[in-house]
Amino acid sequence: MISDKVFFQILFDDTLNKSDEENLKKIIDEELEKPEEEIDPDLLEYCLDELRRLESDSLYCPGKC
């Protein structure tokens, strides 16, 4: 599980990097391990959106972001 500090850095920082990608994937994995009624769809959607943004950014500046 990632710490609250790391999560809030991802949440409020406009720049994403490779470790953020790993943390976002970890959040998604942990969320999907929960019973269905406890899953937070908004959190999953946020993480997926951020992963898409990271992927999109890396297409424009490979190796620099």
Image (cartoon, grey):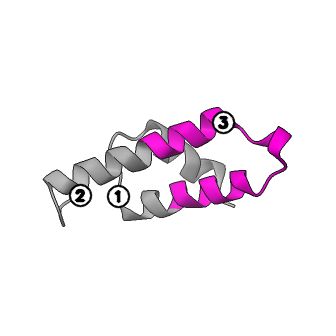
The CA distance from mark 1 to mark 2 is 6 Å
Q: Amino acid at mark 1?
A: Asn
Residue closest to the far bottom: 63
Label 2 belongs to which residue?
65
- Please tell me which residue is depicted at 24% across the width and 49% down the height of the picture: 57
Which residue range is magenta in the image?
A: 23-49
> How far across and down, in percent of the image, does residue 36 sit?
81, 44
Amino acid at dot 2: Cys
Residue 17 point in image, percent of width and height? 35, 58
Name the secondary structure under disc 1.
Answer: loop
For the point 49% across and 64% down, which residue is it?
22
Which quarter of the rendering shows the N terminus?
bottom right
Residue 11 shown in magenta: no
Q: Which residue is mark 3?
A: 41
Query: Badges 1 and 3: C-beta atoms under 8 Å apart?
Result: no
Question: Label 3 amino acid?
Answer: Pro
- Which residue is painted at 33% across and 50% down in the image? 54
Which residue is at 85% across, 49% downward? 35
| Closest to the observer, 65 or 6 | 65
Circle 1 Cα neighbour tier, 10 Å, few/some/many (<14 / 14–19 / ≥20): few
Count neighbours of disc 2 (C-alpha within 10 A) and say few if under 14, some if 14 to 19, many if 20 or more. Answer: few
Question: Going by the image, does 57 lie left or right of 2?
Answer: left
Image-quadrant location for residue 3: bottom right
Main SS, magenta region, reads helix
Task: Judge depth for marks 2 and 3 and give the one in front.
Answer: 3
Residue 17: image tag:
1
